[in-house]
Amino acid sequence: MTAVKHEWRKHEKELYCPKQQAVQVTVPSMKFLVLEALWKQIEHTEQFDKNNLQYRVMIRQPDFVTPDVLEVAIMNVSKKKSLSRFKDVRLESIEDGDCVQILHVGPYDDEPESFMKVDEFCAAHNLQRANDEWHREIYLSDARKVEPAKLKTVLRVQVKSMQF
């Protein structure tokens, strides 16, 4: 099989190229290679502590990737590399549904400013976070190559209509 690069940002701009204003989107079911955990604050405290998080590394996959394709890929890579976490990688279909997202530009430590904009958008549109414990971060920049002030990250939260 020939490797084909699929550029999600070119083909699904609504999901991967938001502006720096919060917008509502519907995220369909997509396949991901998953290695546990989600960004989730384990213990809610006044001060945000990055050492007190769970996260889940997820790499989006094209539709042709099946469990059999993944098994063959892991087997082929395992012949060349000895990585203990290969056995933990799995293929999952995940549907986030209704979400609000924003493009955060700048250091990761400044993300709370962008989340405030998300929360303001939600309040103005009678939405609330469906889950206060986690959010998605989609890294559009390589933090090893881009200065912190220019890092681009899509921040996404699931939402639901407010109940009155």
Image: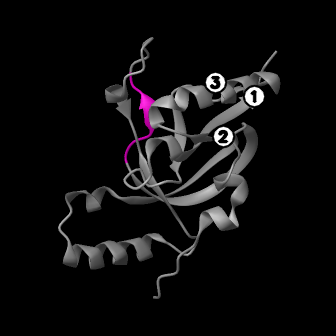
Label 2 crowd bin: few (<14), some (14–19), many (20+), radius 10 Å? many
**Rendered residue at 63%/62% (across/down):** 9
The residue range painted magenta reads: 36-42
Report the residue marked by disc 2. 102
Q: Secondary structure at mark 2?
A: strand
Q: Quadrant of the C terminus?
A: top right
Q: Earlier in the sequence, mark 1 or mark 3?
A: 3
Q: Which residue is mark 1?
A: 121
Q: Is residue 133 magenta?
A: no
**Residue depicted at 68% across the width and 28% down the height:** 117
What is the x, y in percent for residue 13? 70, 59
Q: CA distance from mark 2 to mark 3?
A: 11 Å
Q: Is residue 84 left or right of residue 143?
A: left
- Measured in 3D between alpha carbons, the distance from the residue under mark 1 to the one under mark 3, in whole angstroms, is 9 Å
**Spot occupied by residue 38 in the image (x, y as percentages of width and height):** 44, 40
Which residue is depicted at the point 57% across and 41% down?
Answer: 105
User: Which residue in the protein does label 3 denote?
Assistant: 116
The amino acid beneath tag 3 is Met
User: Which residue is at 52% across, 46% downward?
Assistant: 150
* Percent x, y of residue 45: 42, 13
Residue 97, placed above or below residue 83: above
Is the residue marked by circle 3 packed among few (<14), some (14-19), or many (20+) residues within 10 Å? few
**Residue 110 vs residue 34, the one in the foreground:** 110
